Amino acid sequence: MTVKPQDALSYPPRAMRLHGAAAYLSMSKSAFLRLIEEGKLPSGIHVGGMVLWDRLELDAAFENLKEADEDHPDDPSRKNTIAAILESKR
């Protein structure tokens, strides 16, 4: 198996292709692309025939996702199963 230099880095690269950008946010490529279509993640930039995502833009977009999620603390979909069970016992 060939090891790519970027696979051995101890820090994330500044620019990432689709697979790396989705992995950086711990999501599948399809979820990543869906969030791009929804305008929640940046669409990347075209450089030399490649589409690259800037790590700093991904960080900022993720912060925005967190803030939007925090705006809805009572949303039932945010509660895990244990929290729902405990709440129903009250």
Image: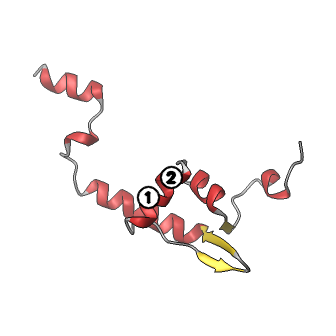
The residue where tag 2 is placed is 30
Residue 29 lies, with reference to residue 64, above or below; the image says above
Q: Report helix, strand or loop for mark 1.
A: helix
The residue where tag 1 is placed is 34
In the foreground, 46 or 53:
46
In the foreground, 34 or 7:
34
Q: Report helix, strand or loop for mark 2.
A: helix
Q: How is the image coloured?
A: secondary structure
Residue 87 lies, with reference to residue 53, above or below; the image says above
Q: Is 20 displayed left or right of 81 in the figure?
A: right
Tell me residue 41's x, y (percent). 45, 66
Tell me residue 38's x, y (percent). 37, 65
Give the spatial CA distance, label 1 vs label 2: 6 Å
Q: Residue at x 64, y 79 (%)?
A: 46
Tell me residue 15's x, y (percent). 67, 69
At label 2, counting other C-alpha atoms closer than 10 Å, the crowd grade (few under 14, some 14-19, many 20 or more) is few
